[in-house]
Image (cartoon, rainbow, N blue to C red):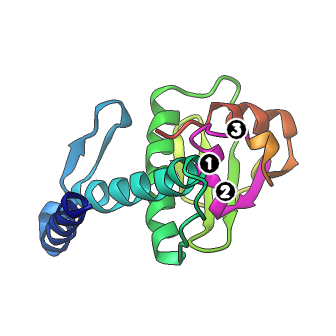
Amino acid sequence: MAEYQRADRRATTLLDVVRRTPAARVRVPMAELGRHPLGLVIGGALVFDHHTHLRHDMAPALRRPVPPTDADRMRAVLTWMIAVLSDQVAQAPVAGLDARIALTLTGPGGGTWWFDEAGGLAPSESTVAAHVTAPALTFPDWGTQCSSWRDSEVTVTGDAELAARFLDAVNVI
């Protein structure tokens, strides 16, 4: 635990220094996850990794209560997941994703994101073919395919087949 706390302090200090400089915007490669701004990698990837593994892997395996979260943590987790998902869709387009899909994650840290065959898009006034809505707290579980979106509180309106093709392809690692 002492080693973990030391590493946590170092990462927090590094993020604090990086985010105050132009280095935060430097895009760095993250293996198959694409290139992302250093500030997002340090803050988003680390928070995502710890948050997801503690809540969805370790606590259940140890039969311990799930640690609490808040909007700030969820926002960091979701920002990272959406950035990676956008790159994944752009690099390996989802077969048949020929129209826009909106993904709304509700609750702490939530928001709405749009996707098409090019990856993530900025929401606009244009229409979408399908709208997927789910609690933000469940996205790290089904968005990493630790569970199926079909077994989660995911609601689809519009083109259900298009949404299913997209949701079946979501696998943020």
Residue bearing mark 3: 167
Residue 82 visible in the shown view: no
Tell me if mark 1 has few (under 14), some (14-19) or many (20+) residues whose alpha carbon lies within 10 angstroms of its own: many
Q: Which numbered disc covers residue 173?
A: none
Q: CA distance from mark 1 to mark 3?
A: 13 Å
Q: Residue furthest top?
A: 95
Image: 59 above or below 110 = above
| Magenta segment | 130-148
Q: How many marks?
A: 3
Residue 39 shown left or right of residue 131 in the figure? left
**Is there a contact, CB below 8 Å, between mark 2 and mark 1?**
yes
At horizontal 53% and vertical 48% (from top left) the residue drawn is 120
Residue 83 shown left or right of residue 6 in the figure? right
Q: CA distance from mark 3 to mark 2?
A: 14 Å
Labels 1 and 3: the sequence-earlier one: 1
- Quadrant of the rendered structure where residue 124 is? bottom right
**Is there a contact, CB below 8 Å, between mark 3 and mark 2?**
no
Image: 122 above or below 13 = above
Relative depth, front residue between 17 and 125:
17
At horizontal 71% and vertical 25% (from top left) the residue drawn is 96
Residue bearing mark 1: 141
- Quadrant of the rendered structure where residue 84 is? top left
Q: Amino acid at mark 2?
A: Thr
Q: Amino acid at mark 3?
A: Leu
Residue 8 shown left or right of residue 128 in the figure? left
Residue bearing mark 2: 138
